[in-house]
Amino acid sequence: MDLSFSPEHQRFRAEVRGWLAAHLERPWIEELRDPANGPDELFEIRRRWQARLHAAGYLGMDWPEAWGGRGATAVEKAILAEELFRTDAPPIPNVLGISLLGPALIHHGSEEQRQRFLPKMLAAEEIWCQGFSEPDAGSDLAALRTRAEPDGEHFRLTGQKVWTTFGPWADWIFALARTDPKDRHGGITFFLVPLHQDGIEVRPIRQVTGEGEFGEVFFDGALARREHVVGQLGEGWRIAMTVLAYERGAMSLAYPAQYDRYLADLVDGVRANGTFERPDVRETLARLVVENEVLRANGLRNLATLASGRAPGPEASTEKIFWSEYARRLSDAALDLLGPEAQLRCRSPHARPHMDWAYEALWSRAGTIYAGSSEIQRNIIAKRVLKLPTD
Amino acid sequence: MQFDLDEDRALLKSSTRELLDKESALSDARRVMEEEPEGFSRAFHGQLGQLGYLGLAVPEAEGGSGAGPLGLVAVLHEMGRVALPGPYLDLVCAGEALRRAENEEAARWLAALVAGEKLVLPAERESAEGVVPLPPRTRFARGRVKGRKSFVPYGASADALLVTCVEGLALVPRPEAGWSSRPLETLDHAQRFVEMELDAPGVLVAEEPRSDAVLAAASRLGCLGAAALLLGLAERCLELSVGYLTERKAFGVPIGSLQALQHRAADMLLRVESTRSAVYRAAWSEEHDPDRAPYLVAVAKVYAGESARLVCGETIQLFGGVGFTWEYDPHIYYKRVKTLEQRYGRTRDALEIALAHSGL
């Protein structure tokens, strides 16, 4: 058993820290607080930050060098994510493209697709959004109804996608559409579709936080080129399900590092409001500390398993439930222990300098829904890990 | 990086499982609980001594088997799985205190303890009152220990007691007339606690305040060990639950196909796996990251205690009516969990240690 980082890993962490100290001008919370930054400015800050990360070689790290990667290990990737979360660096806009579409192209795409799309995706020259969910196909994704019909050198897509993060700023969408209405799973194909064309309308969706990062995408005979089908016709479901596995381990250390930062702000606030010595307050804080440390223990175990060349163990399947449900408890506690100041959004007078707890309290309600709801995660654990009977 | 145990300790763990399956399976735990007045099998205890199990945490240079905290945790993990009855962890704690006492008399008793020849048990608490043991009133004077101790684990079977006194930590061999002890009837029918009147010759093996450090080291090892037992208890309960959910039919289907129950089982898995991560990480830190060990051990104990209570409690619930019978096994696990959560660093105190050491 060895849960320590090797000298190479420690060197890599030092390198990342040095780079961040030199290049991260201000943490994301400060950009959010700046009244000069509207939604478009904030998006451009994210785009520029992604371009800098890419220029430094910190994106697509585990991809082969031929497509802009550096062949890094899962541990290095996790260390980078940890440092980015620890320092509150701006979130990159192509996060879904890089984490989902990138591996899909590397493992299932054509060489032409990789050359055409991967470099611009990494450089944030083209922004991608994800077109999986539909109004009637969320947790039951295979119920999707957007259809794609052949039309010469193209397919024509008709239907509607929702919850397309960064849809309003995106140039391309990677979308699942039905090429065979009769085959539930085998009738789904993976398409790359340019958004700037007739036959596509993108509308922003306003979230409970007030922001509008999501969108709806309406296809009305939108064109996708035949050579922009990823894999074969009817392989879309299989590809979509396998790419979800490639990202495992990447965030193992990032969430605990982020929650360390949140906990530090919470404890600062509790010290300042004079309640840190109250036993009930200490118990609440201690439980939050313990759970975050256990989340980190799971992450270290997950990484150690990957690093020793093994498939992720059962602890990996619990990661999403753990961090997303923990995030709700953490922000609930902050609103409880900090009082009214935790209800202030970051641009309000008297807002806390390092945290927007009001935003977190609302945003934490999304984490248990997106990317496989907590209920779907529990179904998966019951069936695949515990192998409980299906009926 | 590597999460798996090294070869030696993986072998120790697997051979412990074989030994327990053969010599002290759960059916034996039940027999001991129901029939054995001492609450454990003397024969099996002797075997543990011969095989080196009582000196796992003692370095080889001091006569132990030098398996370290990770080896100890691996073994206790297995012992938890069969809800092993008896004073094993209390002996480990007493052994650690004897070792840290750095005293000739203590060293002699440690050797006998490690060999499985003598039982040395800790006697700390003086009454059932007080959530943590109150400061001792027991006195050591002119070579005699005088006072009253309560909740002494397996005290009636002890060859010697390690007694906390106002003056420090005293070793009290069993007097020729035997102990004056009264059994306590407690929540866990498989454990034996007694209260004792002491008035017997003894030796002060560590004087106050040095005795505080000795006791702290022993109690941290107990805390880690209890977390490992809790892991084993919870892990086995999850297996029992999955088995029952798969076999038991209601409404014409296996009940494990019902989503309400599947989701509860998924939460149990999350708890068991996360406890595994936390407990082994804490044991690893005792060997490789000692500065962080007090924090990580407290984290593991809190999480293991609450998780095992949840998992073993859910097991009773998932079994339904039979889960509440003496005949079925879940209660054996649940009772052990409930007591372990309160002993060897109860949850509330471990929470405070975790926060105090968190750096926040």
Image (cartoon, coloured by chain):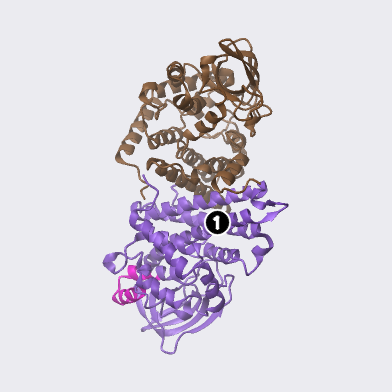
Chain colours: A brown, B purple
Q: Chain of mark 1?
A: B
Q: Give the answer, above or below, for where A360 lies relative to B28.
A: above
Left or right, B233 with reference to A1: right
Question: In the depicted view, which residue is nearer to us: A4 or B312?
Answer: B312
Question: In the depicted view, which residue is nearer to us: B186 or A219?
Answer: A219
Name the spot of residue A177 as percent of width and height, x first.
Answer: 61, 22
* Magenta stretch in the rendered image: B94-113
In magenta stretch: residue A100: no
Residue hosting label 1:
B239
Crowd tier of the residue under label 1, counting other residues whose Cα lies within 10 Å: few below 14, some 14–19, many 20 or above? some
Farthest residue in the bottom direction? B177
In magenta stretch: residue B109: yes
Of helix, strand and loop, which one carries label 1? helix
Farthest residue in the right direction? B251
Q: Quadrant of the N terminus of chain B?
A: top left
Q: Is residue B226 visible?
A: yes
Q: Residue sitting at 64 percent across and 20 percent down?
A: A147
Q: Amino acid at mark 1?
A: Glu
Q: Give the answer, above or below, for where A370 lies relative to B143.
A: above
Question: In the depicted view, which residue is nearer to us: A211 or A70?
Answer: A70
Q: Is residue A338 visible?
A: no
Farthest residue in the front direction? A182
Name the spot of residue A68 as percent of width and height, x first.
Answer: 38, 22
